[in-house]
DNA sequence: CCTCAAAGCGAAGGATTCTTCATATATTGG
DNA sequence: CCAATATATGAAGAATCCTTCGCTTTGAGG
C-alpha cells in the first residue's frame, strides 16, 4: 500500500531487460554515494550518471526529472524499513509489553544503523522533496503494525491506544533521527538507545490497564 | 558562547546606521518568507533581495555568500530558543522533578510552536548548511542549563545524570521535530505534547534516587 | 552647509544545471 | 539471421543562479 507518487514524480518505465535493471541499481547506488560525498546541493544529474557509469540520457529514461529519482530512492528505503518493523511486530504478537518495546526500538534503531551513512544521506535528500505522502504512508503502515502488536499484549491493555501509539512512534522516530544527526560516539548512541527503550517501557506501564 | 562561524560564513560587517539595521531585518524576514513560500531550492539571493525590497548588492554587503545568510538566520533563531530554555531552567531551580519536566517540555514546545511556520522553514534551511558547530553549541548550552536545573531538584537526585539528561533532551528535541514535520492537527499535537511530558516524567521517576 | 564614510544599487560576467532529442547499439522473439 | 523493440549516448539549448564592482545616494559629524 505504498503511496501513489504525484504524477510528476512517477517513474517513466520499468526495466524489462537485465541490463536495464543493472542500470537502475547503479543509478540508485550512485545517488547515495554522491549524496554522501558531495551533499544534496551538489547532487547533479550529470554527477550521478557519471558515478553510475551511465549517461545522463539513460537516467531520464527511467525518471522524468531529478526529484523523481530522489522520490524513488526514498520510497525504496522506507519500504525496507517498514517491512522490518512489520516483521518484528508480528513476531512479538502476544508477548509481554516489555518484550515488545525492546524489540520495536531495537528493530527500528537497527534498521537505521545498519548503514547509518545512507540513513543520514536520505534524511537530507528528503528535504525539498514532495514526499509528505510517502512519509504519511510509512507512518500509517508502521502505526497499524504496532497497534496490532500492542493490543495483543499478554500483560496489559490500554484506553486510547491510538494516542499512546502515535506518541510512542513519534518519540522513537524523532529520537533516532536526533541522535543520528548529532553524530555522537557509537558507545553513547548505544546507551541512549537503551535509555530510550526503558523510557518507552516506563511510559507504557504508566498508562496501561493491568491485566493480572 | 555562540559558535564561531567558519570564516567563509562570517558576516561581512555590522550595521552602523539605523537604516542598515532595518535592511538586515528585512533581509532576514524575507529569507523566511521565501523559504516558506518557495522552498529551499528556490531560495535565491535575487528573490530574497526582491522580497526584502533591497538590491542584491546590499545583501552582499553583509553576507559574503548565500550560505552565510542562512547560517546567520539559524544562529539568531537558536539563540532565542536557547535563551528561553535557560530562563525556564533558572526559574525552576530547586523545584520538584515534575514541575521541571513540565516546564521544560512546555518551554521548548512553545518556543517552536510560537511561529511554527518559521520553525519548519528553518528545519529545512539547516540542511546542506555547515552548521554542525551551531547545533553543537546550542546543544551544549541547553545541556548545561537542564543539568543545573535537574541537579537542584528538591525531590530527587541521579546517578549518571549526564546520560539521563542527554537522553531526555534527545527525546524532547527529536519528538518535537517529528511532530512538526508531520503537520498533524493542532489538537493532536497538544495531546502528544502532554503525553511526552508524562513520558519524560515517568522516565525520571524510574531512574531517580528518591530523596524522602 | 560640507565632506567623507556608510549604505545601496543592479546590470552583467561566469559558471552550473536540467532536460531533450537525434542517433547508435544491444537484445529478443520469430 | 532479421526485424522490432528496448536501451544507451552525450552534445547542446534554455534557464537559472551566484557574485562582483563601478557608481549613486544617504546620513552623520564638524
Image (cartoon, coloured by chain):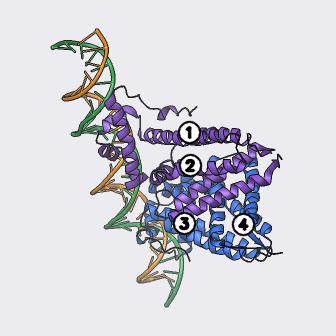
Chain colours: A purple, B blue, C orange, D green
Q: Secondary structure at mark 1?
A: helix
User: Where is residue A211 drawn, in percent x and y?
Assistant: 82, 45
Which residue sits at x=53%, y=62%? A182
Q: Are marks 3 and 2 in contact (CB under 8 Å)?
A: no
Looking at the rendered structure, the secondary structure element under dot 3 is helix
Q: Are marks 3 and 1 on the same chain?
A: no
Of marks 1 and 2, the one in the foreground: 1
- Of tags 3 and 1, the one toward the viewer is 1
SS under mark 2: helix
Chain of the residue under the numbered disc 2 shown in the image:
B
Query: Mark 2 and 4 residues: CB-CB less than 8 Å, in contact?
Result: no
Q: Residues within 10 Å of mark 3 (few under 14, many from 20)?
A: some
| Whether residue A36 is situated above or below residue B23 in the rendered picture | above
Quick check: D13 above or below D20?
Answer: above
From the viewer's perspective, is A157 left or right of B117?
A: right
To which chain does the residue with label 1 belong? A
Which residue carries the number 2 mark?
Answer: B37
Is disc 1 in contact with disc 2, using a CB cutoff of under 8 Å?
no
The mark closer to the camera, 4 or 1, is 4
- Among numbered discs 3 and 2, the one appearing first in the sequence: 2
State whether residue B71 appears in this view.
Answer: yes
Q: Are marks 4 and 3 in one subunit?
A: yes
Q: Give me the disc on residue B135.
A: 3
- From mark 2 to mark 4, how far is it between C-alphas? 45 Å
Q: Of B125 and B188, which appears nearest the observer?
A: B188
Which residue in the protein does label 4 denote? B207
**A6 left or right of B204 in image:** left
Sequence-wise first label, 4 or 3: 3
Q: Quadrant of the rendered structure where residue B45 is? A: bottom left
- Tell me the mark number nearer the camera, choosing from 2 and 4: 4
The CA span between labels 4 and 3 is 28 Å
- Left of D12 or right of it: where is A104? right
Amino acid at each position: 500500500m505504498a503511496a501513489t507518487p504525484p504524477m510528476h514524480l512517477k517513474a517513466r518505465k520499468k526495466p524489462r531487460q537485465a541490463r536495464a535493471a543493472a542500470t537502475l541499481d547503479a543509478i540508485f547506488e550512485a545517488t547515495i554515494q554522491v549524496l554522501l560525498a558531495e551533499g544534496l546541493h551538489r547532487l547533479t544529474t550529470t554527477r550521478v550518471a557519471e558515478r553510475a557509469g551511465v549517461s545522463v540520457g539513460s537516467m531520464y529514461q527511467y525518471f522524468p526529472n531529478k526529484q523523481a529519482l530522489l522520490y524513488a530512492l526514498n520510497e525504496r528505503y522506507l519500504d525496507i524499513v517498514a517491512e522490518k518493523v512489520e516483521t518484528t511486530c508480528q513476531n512479538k504478537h502476544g508477548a509481554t509489553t516489555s518484550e515488545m518495546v525492546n524489540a520495536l526500538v531495537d528493530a527500528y534503531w537497527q534498521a537505521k544503523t545498519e548503514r547509518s551513512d545512507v540513513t543520514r544521506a536520505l534524511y537530507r535528500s528528503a528535504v525539498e522533496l514532495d514526499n509528505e505522502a510517502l512519509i504519511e504512508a510509512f507512518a500509517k503502515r508502521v502505526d497499524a503494525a504496532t497497534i496490532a502488536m500492542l493490543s495483543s499484549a499478554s500483560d496489559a491493555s490500554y484506553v486510547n491506544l491510538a494516542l499512546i501509539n502515535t506518541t510512542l512512534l513519534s518519540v522513537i522516530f524523532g529520537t533516532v533521527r536526533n541522535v543520528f544527526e548529532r553524530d555522537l560516539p557509537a558507545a553513547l548512541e548505544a546507551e541512549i538507545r537503551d535509555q530510550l527503550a526503558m523510557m518507552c517501557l516506563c511510559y507504557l506501564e504508566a498508562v496501561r490497564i493491568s491485566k493480572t
